[in-house]
Image (cartoon, rainbow, N blue to C red):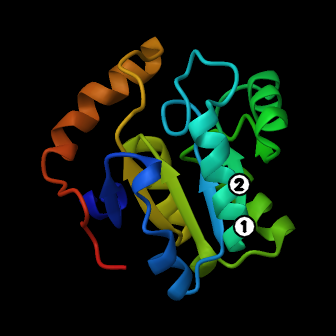
Amino acid sequence: MMENWTPHLCLKSIYDLPCQEFWEKGYRILFCDLDNTVSAYDKPFPEEKFLRWVENRKNEGWEIYILSNNGEERVKNFCEEAKLTGFSNLYKPLPFRTRQIAKELGASPNRIVFIGDQVFTDVWLANQMGFLSVLVDPVAKGDLLKTKINRKLEGLIRKGFVYGKNKSW
């Protein structure tokens, strides 16, 4: 069971992604969670640092998508500013919407890196789908109530994770 919740890689932030290494291994698509992965849950628009990161990744050839459990308006506003395609109301960790998105993009799982800040939604979904799962620390201290509950439980699991590695990839 722990295998479902163990990320392939654990990093401090999205800015620590070893994109060159991923590229060399054949990955071409970055699926990024929105809230507390790339932006604080209460920030409606992306910060300049993230916009530069997106531009650099796109220049390297990466396809980047935002996949979020958040509502359509939140995701749409953020993605318009970042010039990204976003998908809302995903119901992570349930795989049905993400499977449909990957199929529509013509993307095979072994080409997708999924980056998120939560074990029980992002990592679990990525591992179910056969994506490379990357867990990052939340960008903000605050969370919505339902996320605070998850964080308490995942804190017990996170203790065993080592930054820079976990499962082989």
Amino acid on which the number 2 mark rests in the picture:
Glu
Q: Is residue 48 left or right of residue 138?
A: right
What residue is rendered at 45% in x and 51% in y? Answer: 15
Q: Is residue 13 left or right of residue 60?
A: left
Q: Position of residue 90 (x, y in %)?
A: 69, 41
Amino acid on which the number 1 mark rests in the picture:
Asn
Question: Could you tell me which quadrant the N terminus lies in?
Answer: bottom left
Query: Circle 1 — which element?
Result: helix
Extreme residue in the left direction: 160
Q: Position of residue 109 (x, y in %)?
A: 62, 75
Q: Position of residue 98 (x, y in %)?
A: 69, 55
Disc 2 and disc 1 in contact, CB within 8 angstroms? yes
From mark 2 to mark 1, how far is it between C-alphas? 6 Å
* Nearer to me, 110 or 40: 40
Q: Position of residue 71 (x, y in %)?
A: 74, 25
Q: Which residue corresponds to mark 1?
A: 59
What residue is rendered at 50% in x and 76% in y? Answer: 20
Q: Which residue corresponds to mark 2?
A: 55
Total labels drawn? 2
Question: Could you tell me which quadrant the C terminus lies in?
Answer: bottom left
What residue is rendered at 52% in x and 87% in y? Answer: 24
